Image (spheres, helix red, strand yellow):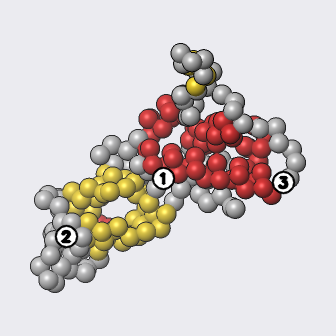
Amino acid sequence: MTITNGYTTLADIKSRADIATADATIDSLLEGYVEAASRLIDGETQRTFYARTETHYFDIPKGRELRLDDDLLTITSVTNGDGTVIASTNYITVPKNHAPYYAIKLTEASTVGWSLNSYGNSEAVIAVAGTWGRSSTAPADIKEACAQIAHSALKRRFGENLSSISMVTAAGVVITPQDIPAFAWRVIRRYRRMA
């Protein structure tokens, strides 16, 4: 297995776990933990920390501002409902000065308006092509959160508890309720995308 868009590396997890040998089975297991931890972070934050080249489609907004469904890093083109490409001089990004962007707004001076397609439809007729994601590479704290989650999963496989939190039931059974380290949860909460 190869890690796809992982937020930490196999070498980092092996170093944390004190695994010096090369073993294809163990390496595949660890790569799976890294990928699972990375996708968990994506799901919990509702964003990605790698760049994706995609086209997203939007309904015509009520005003001049088109709210995006994901973080946008760069714009390749904005195509109106009637199929015409809107020149970059006719819109600004929100926020204006730095990515990721969460909206595209037609300028007040622009004579361009959002338009229906040739069938008179307003749904999913505006196409925004570009590079999507929170960032093209994961920030240091996301990398650390991913490494902690993957390492925790490995330790739990062998019955170890990294969180130092445990509960003892009336029957004397020890339960470790936290699968994700507290630091990782704090990082995830900080990066959650607001609706």
Q: Which mark is residue 123?
A: 2
Q: Check disc 3 and report its element: helix, strand or loop.
A: loop
* Residue 120, x across and y down, in percent: 11, 79
Give the mark nearest the N terminus, 3 or 2. Answer: 3
177 sits left or right of 147 in the view:
left
Query: Does any portion of residue 149 appear in the rendered image?
Result: yes
Residue type of the residue flagged with mark 2: Glu
In this rendering, which labeled residue sits more in front, label 1 or label 3?
3
Q: Quickly name the residue at label 3.
A: 23
Pair 3/2: label in front: 3
Drawn side of residue 135 relative to residue 101, left or right: right
Q: Residues within 10 Å of mark 1 (few under 14, many from 20)?
A: many
Question: At 13% from the left edge and 59% from the top edge, which residue is drawn?
Answer: 62
Q: Give how far apart the Cα atoms at labels 1 and 2 are.
A: 25 Å
Across and down, in percent, residue 109 comes to: 17, 62
Q: Secondary structure at mark 1?
A: loop
- Mark sitting on residue 136: none
Q: Is residue 107 above or below residue 166?
A: below
Q: Using the rendered view, name the quadrant where residue 145 is placed.
A: top right
The label on residue 48 is 1
Choose between 107 and 187: the one closer to the eye. Answer: 187
Q: Earlier in the sequence, mark 1 or mark 2?
A: 1
